[in-house]
């Protein structure tokens, strides 16, 4: 299986690559459209700000490639947010693969922003991407923006309100949490996406 990690400039690329190696997959890091189109699975990692990440994808001429991709695509953290139509962070248009606008999370008593640390997932149904992951399983989050719970949400989380933690619509999927930092839960999600679990 050919797995490509999009060279989006995110600080989590190395740790995602290492997590994939633990699953026996040596992913190629690439910013080349042809390499991405040839992949069996594509992962879009991301840490940082939406505007800067979209600017990098435009510089690499990857926006049209990712929009037209017919292979399974998994966005991680900021990478998941980039799948949506737009983000309030920098008021930027994103890839538009999922409808909706990513919004700043609300700080409330007991819910600081950014949301950092372990939190429980609430599953919506029994999607294959979450096979083997129990309702209430914990995952590790670091983010201050989030997508609303909608029809694409297959797991949500609570922190100052409910937000989409894992989404999937057809071949497009995203995890707001960091699978590479979420122990067995994260490895299971990656394995399910790759079809090796």
Image: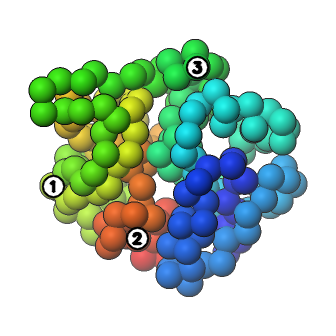
Element assignment for label 2: helix
Residue 47 place in picture, x, y as percent: 54, 46
What's the CA distance linking mark 3 and mark 2? Answer: 31 Å
Query: How crowded is the residue under tag 3: few (<14 C-alpha within 10 Å), some, or many (20+)?
Result: few
Disc 3 designates what residue?
A: 90
Question: What colouring method underlies this structural image?
Answer: rainbow
Which element is circle 3 on? Answer: loop
Q: Residue 52 sits in which quadrant?
A: top right
Q: Which-is-in-front pick, marks 1 and 3?
A: 3
Give the residue at x 34% y 64%: 182
Question: Which residue position holds label 1?
Answer: 136
| Residue 72 visible from this viewpoint | no
Tell me: 41 left or right of 181. right
Residue 152, quarter of picture: top left
Which mark, by number, is residue 187?
2
Left or right side of 14 for 30: right
Mark 1, secondary structure of its residue:
loop
| Between 189 and 46, the one nearer to me in the picture | 46
Quadrant in which the C terminus appears: bottom left
Residue 197 seen in render: yes
Cα separation, mark 1 vs mark 2, equals 16 Å
**Direction from residue 120 to residue 154 in the image, left or right:** right
Q: Residue furthest left?
A: 109
Mark before the other along the chain sequence, 1 or 3: 3
Please give the name of the residue rendered at 19% of the width and 51% of the height, measured from the top-left corner. Answer: 120
Q: Position of residue 191 (x, y in %)?
A: 46, 71
- The picture places residue 74, in percent across and down from the top left corner, at 55, 51
Q: Earlier in the sequence, mark 3 or mark 2?
A: 3
């Amino acid at each position: 299986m050919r797995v490509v990690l999009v060279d989006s400039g995110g600080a989590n690329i190395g740790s995602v690559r290492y997590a994939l190696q633990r699953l026996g997959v040596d992913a190629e890091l690439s910013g080349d459209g042809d390499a991405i189109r040839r992949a069996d699975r594509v992962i879009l990692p991301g840490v940082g700000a939406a505007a800067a990440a979209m600017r990098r994808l435009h510089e690499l001429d990857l926006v049209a490639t990712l929009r037209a991709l017919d292979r399974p695509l998994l966005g991680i953290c900021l990478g998941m947010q980039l799948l949506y139509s737009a983000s309030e962070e920098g008021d930027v248009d994103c890839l538009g693969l999922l409808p909706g606008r990513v919004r700043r999370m609300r700080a409330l008593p007991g819910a600081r922003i950014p949301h950092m640390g372990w939190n429980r997932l609430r599953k919506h149904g029994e999607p294959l991407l979450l096979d083997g992951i129990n309702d209430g399983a914990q995952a590790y989050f670091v983010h201050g923006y989030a997508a609303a719970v909608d029809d694409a949400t297959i797991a949500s989380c609570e922190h100052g309100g409910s937000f989409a933690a894992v989404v999937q619509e057809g071949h497009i999927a995203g995890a707001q949490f960091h699978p590479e930092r979420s122990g067995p839960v994260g490895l299971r999600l990656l394995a399910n996406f790759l079809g090796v679990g």
